[in-house]
Image (cartoon, helix red, strand yellow):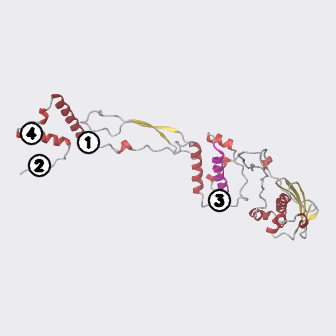
Amino acid sequence: MNVPSPRPLNSISLLWDQTSEHQTTGITNPISSLSSTTAVTMATAGSFLQRCHRALTKIPRLTSQLTSQPPRKPFHPHHPRLLTTSTTTTTTTTALTDLSQPLPEVAPRTRLTPLSPSYYTGSPEYYDNLLALQDLLRSHQALPTIHGDDAPVVKWKTIDEYRLIVGDRVKPSRYNKVIHILDRLNRIDPAIMPAETKEVLALYMRPENQALGRKIERTTDNFGRAYAIGRRKTAVARVFLVEGEGEALVNGMPVNKKFSRLHDRESVLWPLIVTNRVDRYNVFAVVRGGGLTGQAEACTLAIARALRIHEPALKHALREAGCVTVDHRQVERKKPGHLKARKMPAWVKR
């Protein structure tokens, strides 16, 4: 006995089985009992479903070539990428409307493919440049570095020059991110710095006249004195530092008589205290302007600069102690209608 193979249950097979069953048993076919217009509509729908069923079961699926992405072109890591057009040209052997024939392997298409992953950001050129520098820094992260004071003195391009390189208006905060990465790359030990890093840093260096950019090395005079100037608020201190027994005079008076506060006395001699040089140098300072606190902190900066002239090796120790850092803060002026710089009088309703 031949057993018929099972068929998939779908709307087409069920409709066909019900129609044949009604014809065999002599029952009136529901389709024939309908009006002629409804019968034509259902017949058309049946042929459409049959064609869809044949298209889904007999015609092969789309090939992988149709959905494959074209290979990306190489790009320069420090230059913006441009929008290119990728076109796949194929020949169509059969018409797509003919459901009896299989679909072609690759359908013709044309689309715009941005090479830059930052194309849809606000500043694709800037982000491409920033990501390239971050990748370079990440690849050289393990290389030994030197202290920032020992790194080669480099002047980077200004923000206006950097905007010309990128071709977009870059904010100062974004420009500072690039400068921070460049400073970190510049701190790599010059003896083992890769040639790739040197070439990248050279792109951002600002060409200047070497004769104008040369620093004048300060030395002691014929009497062995080191002269330096320090400023804080509106006070200006001029200091002469010479080797001696530890005498300190400010405007011809000892430090204990000039400054009554203990904090101000320590501030004047703080560079000598942190380096253990209190009893090895004599200090002669002349201070003008400002108050006692401003004069004391101005002496701190001037003595630290003069001490670096005698002993340049103390540069790191003085910087760690905060003696050579210039404090540009000033007292904010009083405004009209205010009690002080920002304080307003109490508001009274009546």
Question: What secondary structure is marked by label 3?
Answer: loop
The residue most toward the top is 36
Membership of 223 in magenta stretch: no
What amino acid type should be assigned to the residue bearing mark 3? Answer: Ile
Q: Is residue 255 left or right of residue 126?
A: right
Looking at marks 4 and 2 on the same chain, the residue that comes earlier in the sequence is marked by: 2
* Residue occupying image coordinates x 54% and y 42%: 81
Membership of 184 in magenta stretch: yes
Main SS category, magenta section: helix
What amino acid type should be assigned to the residue bearing mark 1? Answer: Leu
Looking at marks 1 and 4 on the same chain, the residue that comes earlier in the sequence is marked by: 4
Q: Residues within 10 Å of mark 1 (few under 14, many from 20)?
A: few
The circle on residue 192 is 3
Residue 58, x across and y down, in percent = 23, 42
Looking at marks 3 and 4 on the same chain, the residue that comes earlier in the sequence is marked by: 4
The circle on residue 4 is 2
Which sits in the foreground, 253 or 225? 253
> What residue is disc 4 on?
22
Q: Is residue 51 left or right of residue 335?
A: left
On screen, residue 262 above or below 330: below
Q: Kindly indicate the quadrant of the structure image that contains residue 144.
A: bottom right
